[in-house]
Amino acid sequence: MSVEESWAALVEGLRVAGERLAAQTGDLDPRERADGYRALLRALNNQLGRFEVDRERPELLAFNGWREKLLMDNPDFRYWVADVRDDRRYRVTGSLGDAVYQSITAYAGGRVADAAATARIDSDRLTIDADGCFELILSRERPAHGDWLALPEGAQAVWVRQFHRDAAVERLGWCRIDTLDDPTVPPNIDVDRFERQLQRLGQTMSTFPQIFAAAVAVDRERPNEIRHWSEMTGGAAFTEPDIHYLRGAWELDEHEALVIEGPVMPCRYWNVLLYSRFLNSLDYRYRRVSRTSGNATLVDGRYRFVLAARDPGGHGDWLDTEGRKFGLFVMRWLQPKNVPTLPSVRRCKLSEIGRAR
């Protein structure tokens, strides 16, 4: 296939994506339909940001910002991603800022479906100085000195995650990656590889509407419930291996709310976050759409979240649904001592929120 044909394949993939999304969102209101196309555009922006990969001189790039939301982004964490070679040596340096926890994970498998965590280290095992700075060597062989993360055979990507109680107001950290080996000078362009990348991007974009629909199928059949999200365990789909996930959905009328109540499980960190049906977090830049272990209100060791279009007036921690009739919520529990207890979930009128629990 020529480069012209590969470009046409990319354009065709975008056309197919638009048609599929139109078919899936035809019964939604105009705002939700437009939000679907925005999610598709954000997915394209995300993929373009990692289209050109240099494993000889990798960069830790910020991932899943508000313009590049993709597949359950989490604004309470900050992410950086680098594509690497498993036979190279790298140094990762950075600072935690006010993050309460950091993990650095190597993954094998280049696609979400086959991704698997193969090695990791966290801030408990890193040497961190008084200013919150760290340095880590990534390589096959252990270095003579310093902190080390083994790069096992098949490792293709490294993710850095920093966990925040309130990233909007806290001092943020940073990180970078440098190669320790003399890089091989690549050709100015590998035509065959470029053509394959164009074709692959077109194929990937065409599948996103199907991913959106399949991901919420169970939630649409069973709204206003919560379940253990067992598919996201052990680092599957580029997730954090030490997190236990709970997941559910709301389906509410304009004057209704979903009340979620339960005990806090002893753990390192936890949060709850709202998402659209297109797997984008809601507007965290201007609305309260998440709570963490650092800013949730607890009563006798229990949380109470009220998912609604407007503030219920002090009868629990409000999470703003933006007036969406349907959406998703996810709870993340980092290093829980036991399996988190499923909370109670109650659909009710907003006027009933103040009644006894």
Image: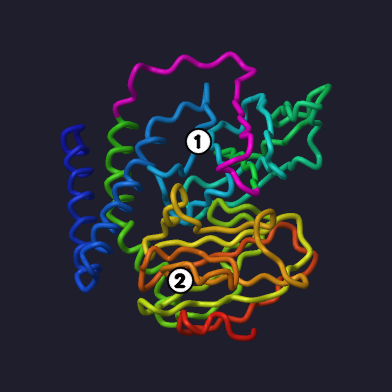
Name which residue lies at 51% across and 54% down.
Answer: 114
Q: Quadrant of residue 291?
A: bottom right
Residue 121, magenta (yes or no): no
Instruction: Tell me: 179 left or right of 47.
Output: right
Residue 37, disc: none
- Residue 87 at x, y percent in the picture: 62, 29
Quote the CA–CA distance across marks 2 and 1.
31 Å
Which numbered mark, 2 or 1, is in the foreground of this view? 2
Count the labels in the image. Answer: 2
Q: What amino acid is labelled 2 in the image? A: Ala
In the picture of the structure, the residue carrying the numbered disc 2 is 308
Name which residue lies at 53% across and 47% down.
Answer: 109
Name which residue lies at 65% across and 77% down.
Answer: 342
The answer to whether residue 280 is above or below residue 222 is: above
Per the image, label 1 sits on a secondary structure element best described as strand
In the picture of the structure, the residue carrying the numbered disc 1 is 62
- Identify the magenta region: 165-191
